[in-house]
């Protein structure tokens, strides 16, 4: 019997390549841009599902505990205060910060909740050889939510808040703090151990790799943006909207209006970048005096009070990363617009970097929310979230959306035109 040699289209550069040998364990990289095309674990498929399911169940229990118990407790001047993550969200809601409360909710509670419950919904029946209804659609949502679930950034935010709060009061770490630490470890293990391709094969068994030798010459090949399945469409269908047979996403040869959408989002982010740095992120009222705390003044405060490591971390996350993202995305847009041939591999690497680092800027939003939710001692000290936090949050979201709208394969398209 002739063995099928699967064709894969690289999601970062669009190159079609045949994988003649799929290793038992390890990664298959794109031969042109070095993107990871497939990742395989040593464990067998059935064992892998069981293993991931155990991790997801443990993480779900930890998630519930982390959300029930307080993160930190404070003792100051005879007052005792404690806050849970959900109380932080409701604090923002009750202080006319609805947009910010939605952002904090999605990144710290909603995102991980959809991730864990979605995986439980799929893996539990799959473990008993059953496919739950709408499994591909649910898994698609889980994958989308992975970008918006930011527990590791939240953890850094909690640690920064503890250092800042310890200057004001006695800080007692709550049960939720330790649970969050464990939860981050488990979620990282789930993301690392889950064999995505294998799970897709289990929940959508009819769709698989394409055999090049059976392809008709008039067939178009399109890579699904969401699940990365290589799909075929015949020319008579190419004018209609086609759906991915595996995850039901709409298929496009390149992300639609990629440059226009990315440019619009980037300009909006640049505009918001000014109030984000000028307006206060936190407003502190103490002994009748009100003082605004901007992103930069927060870093300077930490540096002058001797907390150098924390000042450097905050400087990188809140000042360096957003500026770097704006510069890299502008560079990518300009080079693609002018069909530049300049270092495509390095530009693709820069694109991957923006996707990786963008989320870390959320740390200041978490710090401001936590401190404001905790310090509400009327007559002594009250901390409120300032409008700078809203502007800063919008910069983070807009730059993340801009990076998602950009299609890195456009970098390679102008190279191919020259080679033709
Ligand atoms: Zn590639
Ligand atoms: Zn798909």
Image (tube, rainbow, N blue to C red):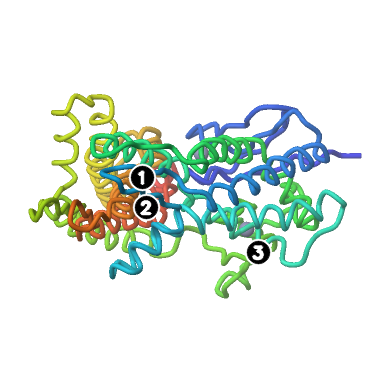
Q: Is residue 222 visible to us here?
A: no
Q: Considering depth in this image, is 210 or 299 the residue closer to the camera?
A: 299
The quarter holding residue 248 reads bottom right
- Figure check: 103 above or below 192: below
Which x, y percent locates residue 387?
20, 61
According to the image, label 1 marks what residue?
358
Q: Quadrant of the C terminus?
A: top left
Q: Which mark is residue 137?
A: 3
Earlier-in-chain disc, 1 versus 3? 3
According to the image, label 2 marks what residue?
400
The yes-or-no answer for disc 3 within 8 Å of ligand 2 is: no
Q: Tell me whether circle 1 and circle 2 mark residues in contact (CB < 8 Å).
A: yes
Earlier-in-chain disc, 2 versus 3? 3
Left or right placement of residue 248 versus residue 402 in this view: right
User: Residue visible at 30% across and 36% down?
Assistant: 342
Which x, y percent locates residue 33?
47, 34
Q: Considering depth in this image, is 154 or 222 the residue closer to the camera?
A: 154
| Marks 2/3: CA–CA distance | 23 Å
Q: Secondary structure at mark 1?
A: helix
Left or right placement of residue 334 versus residue 43 in this view: left
The quarter holding residue 173 reads top left
């Amino acid at each position: 019997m002739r063995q099928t040699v699967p064709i894969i289209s690289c999601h970062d550069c669009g190159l079609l390549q045949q994988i003649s040998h799929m290793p038992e364990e390890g990664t298959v990289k794109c031969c042109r841009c070095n993107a990871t095309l497939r990742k395989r674990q040593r464990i067998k498929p059935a064992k892998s599902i069981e293993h991931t399911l155990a991790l997801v169940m443990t993480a779900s229990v930890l998630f519930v505990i982390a959300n029930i118990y307080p993160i930190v407790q404070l003792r100051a001047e005879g007052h005792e205060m404690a806050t849970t993550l959900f109380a932080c969200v409701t604090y923002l809601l009750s202080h006319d910060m609805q947009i910010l409360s939605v952002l904090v909710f999605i990144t710290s509670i909603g995102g991980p909740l959809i991730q864990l419950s979605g995986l439980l919904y799929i893996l539990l029946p799959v473990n008993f050889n059953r496919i739950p209804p709408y499994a591909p659609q649910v898994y698609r949502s889980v994958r989308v939510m992975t970008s918006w679930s930011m527990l590791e950034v939240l953890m850094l935010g909690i640690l920064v808040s503890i250092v800042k709060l310890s200057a004001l009061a006695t800080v007692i770490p709550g049960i939720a703090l330790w649970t969050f630490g464990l939860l981050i470890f488990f979620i990282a293990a789930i993301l690392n151990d889950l064999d995505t391709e294998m799970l897709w094969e289990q929940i959508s068994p009819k769709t698989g790799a394409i055999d090049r030798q059976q392809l008709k010459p008039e067939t178009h090949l399109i890579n699904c943006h969401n699940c990365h399945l290589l799909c075929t469409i015949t020319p008579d269908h190419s004018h209609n909207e086609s759906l991915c047979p595996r995850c039901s996403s709409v298929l496009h040869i390149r992300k639609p209006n990629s440059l226009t959408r990315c440019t619009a989002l980037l300009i909006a982010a640049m505009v918001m970048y000014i109030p984000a740095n000028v307006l206060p992120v936190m407003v502190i009222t103490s002994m009748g005096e009100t003082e605004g705390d901007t992103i930069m003044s927060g870093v300077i405060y930490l540096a002058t009070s001797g907390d150098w490591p924390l000042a450097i971390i905050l400087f990188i996350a809140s000042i360096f990363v957003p500026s770097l993202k704006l510069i890299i995305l502008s560079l990518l847009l300009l080079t693609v617009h002018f069909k530049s041939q300049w270092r495509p591999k390095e530009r693709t690497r820069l694109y991957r970097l923006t996707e990786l680092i963008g989320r870390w800027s959320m740390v200041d939003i978490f710090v401001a929310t936590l401190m404001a939710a905790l310090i509400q001692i009327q007559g002594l000290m009250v901390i409120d979230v300032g409008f700078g936090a809203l502007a800063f949050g919008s910069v983070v979201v807009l730059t993340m959306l801009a990076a998602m709208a950009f299609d890195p394969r456009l970098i390679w398209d102008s190279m191919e035109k020259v080679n033709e």
